[in-house]
Amino acid sequence: MFSLGEKPLLTGCGLSQMEVLAPEWTPTPEFIATTNLAWAMQTVDVDSYEALHAWSLRNPAEFWKLASERLGVRFRAPFERVMDLSRGLEAPRWFPGARLNIVESCFAAAPESPAIVHQAEGGTLSVMSYGDLKALTGRVAANVRRMGFRPGEALAILMPMTAEAVAIYLGVVAAGCAVVGIADSFRPREIATRLRISGAVALFTQDVMIRNGKTLPLYANAIEAGAPVAIVIPGLHGAAVSVPLRRGDCKWDVFLRSDAPFETTLCAPEDTMNILFSSGTTGEPKAIPWTHTTPLKCATDAHFHQNIQPGDVLVWPTNLGWMMGPWLIFASLINRATMGLYCGAPTGRELGVFVQEAKATMLGVVPSLVKTWRNTGCMRGIDWTALKLFSSTGECSSADDMRWLMQQAGGRPVIEYCGGTEIGGAYLTGTLVQPCAASTFTTPTLGLDIVILDESGQPASSGELFIVPPSIGLSTTLLNQDHHEVYFAGAPNGTGGRILRRHGDQVQRLPGGRWRAHGRTDDTMNLGGIKVASAEIERVLQGVASVSETAAIAVLPPDGGPSQLVIYAVCTDVCDAGKDGLAAAMQSAIKQELNPLFKIHDLVLLEKLPRTSSNKVMRRELRSLYSVSQ
């Protein structure tokens, strides 16, 4: 096992021991002195970032106490200690004895400061102040309780990332309930699965959603999914709800009829405030509870690694169904910054103009989005000089694409950010006090350590990544699976018998102390920044005519960049459509039943799929075969 700063020998990584990537951006000493990390180094009396990271690992309780105080996390009743390991490293308790509601830590900025700058597709720029957001949040919370929903119950949100969606999210949490995040791109089957697993007792949604000039149904999808009582918001600003409602459902303005003052519900730190979903290899998504301490991980990562400061404007096209939606809320508000929300398709020029007009200082991306911008030239001539940095997550990125992105803002750095829903943020990222080389990482996040092991469980420079617990943000329970079995059972031990937590990513340590991610090691893939299990795609494709069996894999293009979806299929004796027709039918099924963002890159027809002696499909062999054939 090695930690940051150790230099393991490089074997089988395809790079010379002497090869070191040249950075595209290097901070000046004057700039470093202005960063949040410089404050932290001075506070704990160390002279380098490496020493600060090592200190955060030796002193996890002191680090998280420092972070919570720096960010102004509000505890209404004091904690007995920062970290309690009496239940073991798999299930630490953070701030035991405390009472808080994390929403109260989101409104430390001056009431007149901008909390959200937002724009709907085809609309104009609007600003919501911290005072207005707090007032609407309180109103939502009061009416959640007026309708009889009790603390601890789960209320779902099926909406695009709008200012109203943010207020609903915060209001549900302020009322002591748990938000169930459901992506607006999901079809009824996937919506129904998430409602069932979470036990949601109500749903906030819109009547329709506008994307690329098209009107898409949201409320109708919710009804088809068998949603519980729904509160319906107009999808068109200033318009009335445009569809008839079921008996018992209510419109947004009716829901908000009470404006009585509301006292935030206090919770224990380990109480659930958000239920998010991350695909596993079983076909059913894992239901991951976020507690009232998880947002501290979001805000801390943003504070130290993206250097977010009061007055910054953060734009990251995302959704409350994915972890980056809640991450954006807490990374912005707890840091007294501003969220920039563009409600529309992120692939075109209008988003770029929004970034310009909102005077964004950070733009978050997924690599496939950058590739689209670069290929279409849609951002040409837009002024992004207000940006201080980019941040990229969700997929492996292409160095050429990231260099192109940096050039769009005069050479600003890209902070790569790799983690997961069950981490509450990242395990591997970068900083603004270290040089930036495109598509590489420079450090594990503060307060968290990682190791790389080969297939025999030995320390290596390239292999499967494991997390060394504990850290705030790491999940301790799952609603629908055995947490120990998923993350700890069968995992090798680290040096000295230390417990390691499985994550499932393939990572390489490069010469010069950098890191590079190489995608998933299991049967889960990232497509368009969305994690999905092979089994989920294969289940949908089983219903396509002429298909006997399928195997879905993700491959990385030879020049690097986002994963591409490849389908291996065995057909019945009769396949009248031919390969192209079959691929089109499969794409249609994925679009209708799963997610239109999952695009088939290639279809390969086989007489039979390779299987183990226990009849499991050998997807790793298929990935190797496909790589050799290209």
Image (cartoon, helix red, strand yellow):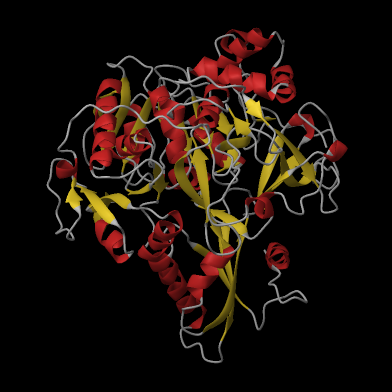
- The foreground one among 578 and 112 is 112
The residue sitting at 82% across, 44% down in the picture is 493
**In the displayed structure, would residue 468 be above or below residue 539?**
above
Please indicate whether residue 359 sits to the left or right of residue 54 in the image: left
- Whether residue 72 sits left or right of residue 41 in the image: it is left
460 or 211, which lies in front?
460
Q: Nearer the viewer, residue 462 or 254?
A: 254
Q: Position of residue 123 (x, y in %)?
A: 21, 38
For the image, the number of numbered tags is 0
Report the side of 582 relative to 439 (left or right): left
Whether residue 417 appears in this view of the structure is no
| Quadrant where the N terminus is found in the figure | top right
Residue at position x 72%, y 75% from top? 611
Asked which quadrant contains residue 511, the reply is top right
With respect to residue 391, does 249 lie above or below? Answer: below
- Quarter of the figure with residue 62: top right
Residue 256 appears in the rendering: yes
**In the rendering, at what x and y percent does residue 110 appear?**
33, 14
Quarter of the picture holding the C terminus: bottom right
In the figure, 227 relative to 34: above or below? below
Which quadrant holds residue 261? top left
**Residue 233 appears left or right of 201:** left
Most distant residue in the bottom direction? 573
Residue 94 percent coordinates (x, y): 59, 30
Q: Residue at x 55, y 64 (%)?
A: 283
Q: Residue at x 40, y 51 (%)?
A: 182
Expressed as whole percent of the image width and height from the top left, the position of residue 287 reads: 51, 52
Q: Nearer the viewer, residue 604 or 381?
A: 604
